[in-house]
Every structure is written in C-alpha cells, then in structure tokens.
Image (cartoon, rainbow, N blue to C red):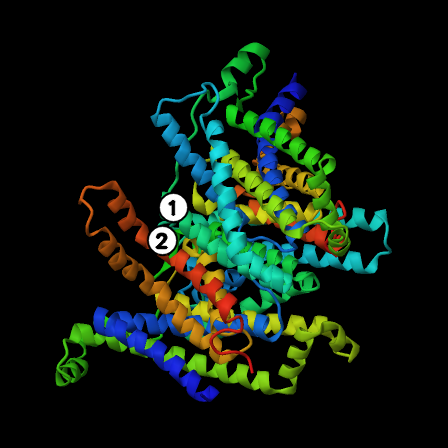
Amino acid sequence: MDALNALVALTNFVIVPAVAYGSQLALGALGVTLVYGILRFSNFAHGDTMAFGAMIVVLVTWGLQGAGVSIDPLPTALLAIPFGILGTIVLVLITDRLVYRFYRAQKAKPVILVIVSMGVMFIMNGIVRFIIGPGDQRFADGERFIVSARDFKEWSGLAEPLAIRTTQGITVVTAVIVVALLFWFLGRTRTGKSMRAYSDNEDLALLSGINPERVVMVTWIIVAALATIAGTLYGLDKSFKPFVYFQLLLPIFASAIVGGLGNPLGAIAGGYLIAFAEVAITYPLKKVLGYLLPESLAPDGLVQLLSTDYKFAVSFVILLIVLLFKPTGLFDGRAH
Amino acid sequence: MSDGLRNSLLFGAVALLIVGAGVIQGANTALLIVNMGLISAIMAIGVNLQWGFAGLFNIGVMGFVALGGLAAVLIAMPPTTEAWAAGGLGVIVALLLGAATVVLAVLVRLRMPKGPLRLLAMLVILIGGFFLYRSVFDPATSAVEAVNPAGTGYLGGLGLPVIIGWPVGGLLAAGAAWLVGKTALGLRSDYLAIATLGIAEITISVLKNEDWLARGVKNVVGLPRPVPYEVDLQASEGFVQAAADFGMDPVIASALVVKLAYAALFTAVLVVVLVGAQLALKSPWGRMMRAIRDNETAAEAMGKDVTRRHLQIFVLGSAVVGVAGAMMTTLDAQLTPGTYQPLRFTFLIWVMVIVGGSGNNFGSVLGGFLIWFLWVEVEPMGHVLMSLVTSGMADDSAIKANLLDSAAHMRMLTMGLVLLLVLRFFPRGLIPEK
C-alpha cells in the first residue's frame, strides 16, 4: 500500500506536471530546431513568437466567450487556436520578407542573423505589450479537472490524492497529434522531404531543383503553427504573461541543444528530459521517500534538492554537461 | 568630410539632444541621462571588447552587471555583527566545503584513469559533497536570515568606502567570467550565447533567493555614497551662500551638485577605460585579437593560442561590465535583484554596441549615450504622440485609453526598430571600425 501511495504521490507531483511541461517544451524546441535546420540560425525571437500567437488566441477566446460560444467541458481556447496560427503565420511571413530575406540573400553569417533575431524579439515583445499589456491574463474555461483529487481518493481508497487537470490532458493529447502530423509531413509528403533534403545538404537540394524560398516559407508556416500551439498550451496550463515566454527561451533552447540542434526527434526527447529534471530536482521528495523508507530512516527535511527558483539552473547544468561531453547533442544534430 | 569631423558632429548631435532634454524637462533630468549614459558607455565598451575585438557573442551581460552591484553592497554596507555571530562561520565553512567538493571532483577526473570507476568516484564525491554542504549551509543561513529579518537578515558588508567596490565588482565579474569562459568558450557562437544567457539568469536567481547574501528580493537600500548628501549640503552655510551667489535655490542647487559630482567620478572611470581600450586596440595585442576574430584558423596556424586569447578578452570585457554594474548600484544607492531584466541589461547594451559601431570604442560611447537617451525619452515622446493621435477621440473611448496606456511599451518597439534599421542600412554602425 505504501509503495502504491508513493507511486501516486510521485505521479501527482512529478510525472503529470513534467509530462505536460515537457510537451510544451518539446513543441517550442521543435520550432527552434526547424528554424535552425532550414534557416541555420538560433532564433531568439521564438519565445516572443509564442507570446504573439498565444495573445491572438487569448483575444479570440475572449471574443468567442463574449459571443457565448462554448465547447464545454473543453476550453474555448481550442476553437481559437486556428485564428492564432493564421495571425502568427502572417506575422512571421511579413517578418521574413522584411527582415530575414535580405540577410539570406547576402549569405550573412549565422551570428548576424542571431543579432537580427534579437531585434525582431524586441519588436514582437513591444507589439504584444502594446496590444495586450504586460499583465497576467486568464482565458482558460471549461471543466477544470479530468481526475479530481477527491474522486480519485474515493475511488482508490488511497491516502494520496491524484489530480489531473484538463489543461494537462489537452496539452499531452495536442502535442501527440501535432508531433504525429509533423513527422508524417516531414517523412511522407513531397514538401516535407524537400525540407529535409534542404536541411541535410543545401547545395545538393538546390541542384535537384528544390525552390529554397518555398522551403523557407513552409518552414515559417510550420514554425508559426508550432509556436502558437506551444504558447497557447503553456498559457492554458499556467497563465498568459508576455514576459514568461521570454524566460522560456532558456529551457527551450536547452531542450533543442540537448537533443541535437536541427534534429526534430532530439527536440522532443530534450524537452521531456529537461522537464523531468527540472520538476524532479525542485520537488520536495519527502512525501515519496516517507512512504518508501522504513520509519526510522524517514527524512526530516523536505528532501528538496534545489529550491524551485533554481529551475533555470537545472536546465542549464544539463545543457552544459551535454555540450561538454557530447557537443552534437544526444541525437546527432547537424551542428558541428 | 573627414572622419574626425563626422564623429565630432555625431557626438555634438547627441550632446545637443541631451541639452535639449535639459531645456525642456529641466537640468536634473538631463544630468540623470548623462550619469546613466556614462555608465552605459562603460558597459558598451566592455561588450565591445568581447564582440567588437574578438567576436565573442556574450548575452549574459546582465549577470556581470548584477555581480558588480553585489560587490558594491558587500564592500560598502556595514557588517551585521549579530548575523556573523549567528551563522557567519557556518556559511563560510559550507561554501569552502562546496568549493572543496568541486575541486576534488575535478581532481579525480584529471588524475584517475578513464572508466566506470572514475565516474562512480566522481558521482560519490559530488552527491556526498552536496548533502554535506547542504547540512552545514541550511542551518547557518536560516540563523543568519533570522537576525532582524525586516532590517538586515543578511551578513552585511565590510563597511569600506563604496568606491573600493567598483574595482572589486570588476574582479568578481572577472572571476565569474573565467569560470564561464573555461567551460563555454570552446563552443560555437550560438552555444556560447545560450550558455552566457543561462549564467546570467542563474546569477539573478541566486541574488533573488540567497537572502543571507544580499537580502534577496527584500533589496538592500541606502548604500553609503561616495559624494555628499543633499541635506548636508543644504545645511552647510558656505554652500547656501554659494548657491545664493549664483542666484539658485539651495535645494535645487544641492541636487544638481550631487549629480555633477557623480558625473565627474563616472567620467574619470570612463576616460580610464576608454584610454585603456584604445591603447589595447592599437597595440600588437589588439591587432592579434582582430586577426583571430577575422580568421581563427589562420591565426591558429600562425601559432596564436586562440582559446587562451579568447578567455583573456572575455574576462577583461566582463570585468569592465562588472565595474559599470558596481557604479550603477552606487548611483541608485540600492541593489534590487527583481529589476534585473535581460531586455534592459543585456540586449539594450547590445543595441548600444551595434548602433555605435562594433569594433570602435568611440562608437560604443556614442551608442551608450544615444541609446540611453532614446530609452529614457521614447516614453514621454510616445505620450505626446499618442495624445496627438487620440486628441480627436472621445474621452471615454476604450481605444484612446488603451493607446495612452501603451505608450509605455513604445521603448521595446523603438529599440528593435533602431537595431534592425542600423543592421540593415549601416551594418558597421554610426562610427565604423577603422
């Protein structure tokens, strides 16, 4: 019984939140890794692209809620996501046309593009604050829990509760669907294959008649969709606040690099690795150990390895270790 | 037009902008801009050393600024003797234990033959050391933080003059930069960027959470000043008399004099840093740096130790940034970890360097003043603009309220726009590298 209780406590406080957070990170890292693979630079504006997409979703959600549209028990935001994706596609395509294309034609060094993306980051950040303000926005509605703590206790008769929020469930389901679609697209369709070819060897791809501008456009469209979905899911799960998306950059980049920049599979693995490490190391394990160890050995402290405020440090240390010992990432990325 | 004339005109134009702000908004505002402009210029020179001279992409500027600020606090604030008695020894022992653990682990890695045994030994040392460290550290810090938490609750500083904190801030930042550089400098530029970004975030979270060190988010306020206080000036008869001779109100005069005194101190530091950077740029060492930047492989083939030179200049540039960080904390007379944001303390400095002209020290100084001026003045200008735009709308219109509120966020847009425009049309900046 104690082992079961420990397992439930671990699931409730570590596994469920980490899976949801990891899915959000994986979607964000996929966007970063695609830009890196095709356009060959680290896009620092990605966090703010996520914020922009999520912002449109929030605005449309408010509109829908105001009009009385509802898909209870699911959150209305799901209906608004397509609008967010469309808006973000328009934004990134305009950005590419006005900003990035010039440097691409010049074959500018990647580091110049990174600095350019810093400028884009400032502007997107400004636009988001301009439209919706810097504050916290709530837009989640619908049923709050799939499994509520009380129901689970009654059903199982265990001392430990287990709660799964709707947003966590939706996050995971959406992430699985999106990733499946993405891999189907990259592996099975003509356009997807041309993207992979372009990413693997640009010159060879050009020789075989692949239109680079088209590849780049499709990439931005996919990145916009991924960013919007990741941003919305994160906003639903926690709350929407423009500044938070900038701070997500570090774990997102850590996920992409740990998995191997440019490798989509690596981005997903990296996302979950970072999320599990962050949650597990900053969660006080007292309860779990209390069930598992005999009473005499039960810990008196919280057994929290690091306080939650140091979660950046966790992703950073993992990043550093991987970079030092396997610089191309766990799954070989194309960065050498 | 010769370069010298063109540059003088550019500096003159920025000076005119600041004087203009002084005429419209008062001399006090103009001096505030000048003081922060001086500090920004020093930070920009530091970043220019790394990026302009050596092509190192450091976006962890914020962390080094904060470390400089920490040094100012640790040097200038009076020590909290009670807290030292309660847990000072424990904290020091714990920190030494932590350092010993890391050193031991590194030694094991260097000395033992490669294999699973070495990995095991390292893991045992690191994990065991961590718990040992926590078992000493946790009670000591809680004891320190329990001492008068509303007023002090930290170990305090050394109670020395705050100016000593400036070079110490440089040293602290240099030490951190050495550690970062040792681990991350071999990496590609993107990775170095992420690594420095991470270090900066971690530095800030340490400052926010380690209350025993500098009170965390409770902030350290009331740092001693290197210049006289306004009230003391107003109380001194000689000063009041002198102010009256100039026909000025003593209250206003005292505020101006204090700011001028800061400006004189900061100018002195800026001149030292600028002269040093110029001499370095023109020396064989500076030429070697640029050679390495332009072609690492060729420089390495010529027998230059690229990694060591990179580490050297990374440490130097970070030290300059650290000094500027300590100066800023001195000017504010407080350390507020919650206000350190990467957009303001990392990316804004980058905009200064790029706009001024990377690789040119005078460009960094110009960029520092110009961009700081814009950062401060865009908001009021935005308000004026928005009032004009919305003047035709009804007073209760929601759009009008939103537009007026959002003027505050114009800075981000402007900075991004300035950066993109300069990169596109003047990629070498306002004062290009020669």
Residue A237 seen anywhere in this rendered image of the structure: no
Q: Which residue is mark 2?
A: B409
Q: Chain of mark 2?
A: B
Based on the displayed image, in which of its 4 quarters is residue A226 positioned?
top right
Q: Quadrant of the C terminus of chain B?
A: bottom right
Point 57% across, 20% down: residue: A160
* On screen, residue B120 above or below A3: below
Q: Nearer the viewer, residue A183 or B339?
A: A183
Q: Where residue B369 sits: x, y (%)?
A: 39, 73
Q: Which residue is mark 1?
A: A134
Residue A222 seen anywhere in this rendered image of the structure: yes
Point 51% across, 46% down: residue: A49
Q: Residues within 10 Å of mark 2 (few under 14, many from 20)?
A: many
Q: Where residue A10 sits: x, y (%)?
A: 62, 27
User: Which amino acid, by three-letter code, is at mark 1?
Assistant: Pro
- Counting labels gives 2
Q: Is residue B187 left or right of residue B381?
A: right
State how far apart marks 2 and 1 are (Cα). 9 Å
User: Which amino acid, by three-letter code, is at mark 2?
Assistant: His
Q: Nearer the viewer, mark 2 or mark 1?
A: 2
